[in-house]
Image: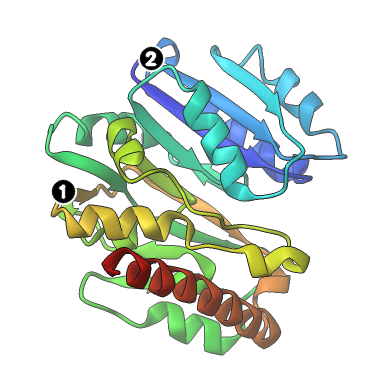
């Protein structure tokens, strides 16, 4: 077994079903990867959705942990993973058929510690013009819109800054994640947002600081669901506020380390 796919989820059984369906259709051999679903306190039929996939996904395991926080699930997946290559995905993605095959290929380079790919938008409704214009802007690599975790850097394998590998499609060597001391608190419900940390950003900063290699592989790609309630100015303002909390967390920690 070569890869561990780790999916934290909470009360999004319908979206999770689509994610797991795409995993069942991977070109990568089914006996070469495992799928770990961490249920962070769902009250819907999440567990039943996972159980229904037993016949289509060879090595799938379900764990329940009611403790709030996205990274509670991610760390539980780290603990339970049987392989050294961890493929973190959100419960609202739909993976390309060759997603896992491409991730495994990229890690054949022993210098590579982090792999990402396209995170293409799967719009619930037609986006307003201002979101579409933001998405169409081009940076040094291609298109990206961090507030919606969507990205497209074209069709060539390239080395990129680790800050462009986002949690919905985030593959990392276990030893690197442990070296970086895991994920910091993040992904809390809005009423607990004051406890938010900087999540996978802390991992990206660690990789950048140590000059480790990050690869963008266009085949290691997913569609990322963008619901209509995230295509509003109110959502972007809330997202910016939450980002400020995360940035403050990073800044304070860095200053304490220097002391």
- Where the C terminus falls, by quadrant? bottom left
Is residue 258 at all visible to an observer of this figure? yes
Residue 213: which numbered mark, if any?
1
Q: Position of residue 37 (x, y in %)?
A: 62, 30
Residue 127 picture quarter: bottom right
- The residue sitting at 56% across, 88% down in the picture is 129
Q: Are marks 1 and 2 in contact (CB under 8 Å)?
A: no
Vertical placement of 62 versus 150: above or below?
A: above
In the displayed structure image, the side of residue 122 where residue 166 appears, left or right: left
According to the image, label 2 marks what residue? 32
Is residue 24 at all visible to an observer of this figure? no
- The residue sitting at 66% across, 70% down in the picture is 194
Label 1 to label 2: alpha-carbon separation:
24 Å
- Where the N terminus falls, by quadrant? top left
Q: Position of residue 176 (x, y in %)?
A: 28, 39
- The residue sitting at 71% across, 71% down in the picture is 228
- Nearer-N-terminus badge (1/2): 2
- The residue sitting at 32% across, 49% down in the picture is 116
Q: Position of residue 190 (x, y in %)?
A: 73, 67
Residue 106 picture quarter: top left
Q: Residues within 10 Å of mark 2 (few under 14, many from 20)?
A: some
């Amino acid at each position: 077994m070569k890869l561990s796919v780790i999916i934290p989820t909470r009360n999004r059984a319908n979206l999770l079903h689509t994610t797991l369906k795409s995993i069942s259709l991977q070109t990568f051999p089914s006996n070469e990867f495992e799928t770990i679903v961490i249920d962070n306190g769902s009250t819907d039929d999440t567990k039943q959705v996972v159980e229904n996939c037993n016949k289509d996904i060879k090595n799938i395991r379900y764990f329940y942990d009611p403790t709030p926080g996205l990274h509670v699930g991610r760390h539980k997946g780290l603990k339970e993973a049987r392989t050294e290559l961890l493929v973190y995905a959100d419960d609202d993605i739909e993976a390309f058929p060759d997603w896992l095959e491409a991730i495994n290929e990229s890690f054949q380079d022993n210098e590579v510690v982090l792999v990402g790919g396209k995170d293409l938008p799967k719009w619930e409704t037609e986006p307003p013009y201002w979101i579409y214009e933001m998405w169409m802007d081009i940076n040094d690599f291609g298109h990206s819109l961090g507030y919606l975790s969507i990205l497209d850097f074209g069709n060539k394998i390239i080395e990129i800054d680790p800050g462009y590998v986002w949690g919905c499609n985030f593959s990392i060597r276990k030893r690197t994640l442990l070296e970086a001391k895991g994920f910091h608190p993040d992904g809390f419900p809005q009423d607990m947002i004051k406890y938010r940390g900087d999540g996978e950003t802390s991992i990206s900063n660690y990789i950048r600081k140590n000059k480790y290699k990050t690869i963008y592989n266009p085949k290691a790609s997913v569609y990322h669901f963008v619901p209509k309630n995230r295509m509003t100015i109110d959502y972007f303002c809330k997202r910016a506020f939450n980002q400020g909390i995360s940035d403050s967390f990073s800044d304070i920690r860095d200053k304490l380390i220097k002391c």
